[in-house]
């Protein structure tokens, strides 16, 4: 009998496909610090990110019986207040301050290795907030801004910790490129050690969700280097004046203790909107990996839009965003773009605003008085 070459199979074949997988929610906060130390553990290398999860891990930064130093106490304060892990990049402390500053700012070595602040990009997990506590300069702010813009995180920079005018002068150097940078002023003190303002602010920020604001968060400190005047109903107070120039500060809490005062980053953007926007971008970047094998056909468009719509609905249900919708752009998607393997997807979304300014009307009302007088006449007349 001749073989029937045209017959494939007298039966049935099943092909099963699955839609694009679910996307994650809003990530938890994760800190990132860089600084210098002389007494690190031999178990870690200079210039390499190391994850610090608990107070016991602080021995990686300083192995002495009585640890000290800006970096050690900054990380200790962050762990106690934010109660989330952080990556730490250490460099050997040098007697020359310029050398320390250059090491912290870093860049790319001749061998192509990321150094200094840029090494945050090499962390196994990308931090949501980064700082170089104790290093105050526009160069540090610029380096932090560059990494924040590339990795979609927030960065924290120290103000001059001198006077209000000095803080405003420094803030004037920051602009649109520092959209993801918070500028903080006023040093704190804890355990008889200095806690830089960037650490105080970043700890307050990481104690809340990315979509929330740290404004009004408690800052457990023993003291602060200077008192910044602030009254909640005085728009000309010192604290409000600093906030208007993009500087967040630690002030006396009207309810006792100290608190963080600030809702906006250095360029005037609401910090909580920057935070949730960063999280949206990071999750979209991660989810792109799973879509690379698909052709731009109708099934793919349908799956990708459904996947993103379901994800955005879950974020809305969790109170992270007000709402959102996902669709193909009507005019930017065209023949030439499609022939080049490009397509334009639009996500419209709404973010909650922080409670920055409450306006309360207190009006005396004659109608209420008239009702009272009439009742009095009826009762006693």
Image: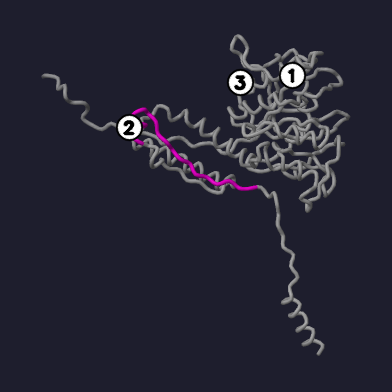
How crowded is the residue under tag 2: few (<14 C-alpha within 10 Å), some, or many (20+)? few
Q: Which residues are magenta?
A: 334-353
Per the image, the residue denoted by label 2 is 15
Q: Quadrant of residue 380?
A: bottom right
Secondary structure found at label 3: helix
The answer for how far apart the CA atoms under marks 2 and 3 are is 40 Å
Q: Nearer the viewer, residue 293 or 372?
A: 372
Q: Residue at x 64, y 23 (%)?
A: 120
The answer for how far apart the CA atoms under marks 3 and 1 are is 20 Å
Per the image, the residue denoted by label 1 is 101
The answer for how far apart the CA atoms under marks 2 and 1 are is 60 Å
Q: Residue at x 60, y 35 (%)?
A: 27
> Marks 1 and 2: in contact by CB < 8 Å?
no
Q: Residue at x 59, y 47 (%)?
A: 319
Query: Residue 98 appears at what percent x and percent y?
Result: 76, 16
Tell which tag, 2 or 1, sits nearer the viewer: 1
Lower position in the chain sequence, tag 2 or tag 3? 2
Per the image, the residue denoted by label 3 is 122
Q: Quadrant of residue 166?
A: top right
In the picture, the quarter occupied by the C terminus is bottom right
Q: Quadrant of residue 195?
A: top right
């Amino acid at each position: 009998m001749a073989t029937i070459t045209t017959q494939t199979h007298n039966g049935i074949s099943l092909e099963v496909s699955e839609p694009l997988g679910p996307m994650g929610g809003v990530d938890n906060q994760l800190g990132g610090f860089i600084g210098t130390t002389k007494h690190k553990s031999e178990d870690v290398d200079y210039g390499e990110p190391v994850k610090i999860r608990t107070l016991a891990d602080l021995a990686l930064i300083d192995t002495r019986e009585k640890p000290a130093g800006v970096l050690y106490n900054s990380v200790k304060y962050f762990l106690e207040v934010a109660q989330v892990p952080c990556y730490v990049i250490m460099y050997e402390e040098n007697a020359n301050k310029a050398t320390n500053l250059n090491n912290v700012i870093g860049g790319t070595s001749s061998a192509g290795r990321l150094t200094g602040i840029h090494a945050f990009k090499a962390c196994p997990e990308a931090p949501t907030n980064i700082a170089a506590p104790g290093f105050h300069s526009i160069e540090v702010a610029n380096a932090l801004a560059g990494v924040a813009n590339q990795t979609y995180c927030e960065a924290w920079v120290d103000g001059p910790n001198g006077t209000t005018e000095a803080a405003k002068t420094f803030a004037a150097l920051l602009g649109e490129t520092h959209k993801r940078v918070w500028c903080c002023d006023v040093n704190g003190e804890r355990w008889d050690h200095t806690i830089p303002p960037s650490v105080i602010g970043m700890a307050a920020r990481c104690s809340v969700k990315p979509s929330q604001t740290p404004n009004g968060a408690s800052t457990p400190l023993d003291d602060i280097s200077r008192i910044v005047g602030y009254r909640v109903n005085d728009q000309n107070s010192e604290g409000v004046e600093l906030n208007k120039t993009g500087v967040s500060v630690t002030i006396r809490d009207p309810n006792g203790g100290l608190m963080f005062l600030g809702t906006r980053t250095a360029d005037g953007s609401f910090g909580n909107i920057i935070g949730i926007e960063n999280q949206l971008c990071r999750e979209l970047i991660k989810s792109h990996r799973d879509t690379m094998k698909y052709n731009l056909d109708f099934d793919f468009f349908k799956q990708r839009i459904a996947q993103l719509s379901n994800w955005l609905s879950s974020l809305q249900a969790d109170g992270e965003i007000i709402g959102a919708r996902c669709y193909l752009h009507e005019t930017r998607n065209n023949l030439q773009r499609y022939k080049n393997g490009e397509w334009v997807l639009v996500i419209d979304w709404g973010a909650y605003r922080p409670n920055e300014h409450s306006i309360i009307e207190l009006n005396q009302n004659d109608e209420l008085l008239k009702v009272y007088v009439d009742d009095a006449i009826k009762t006693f007349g």
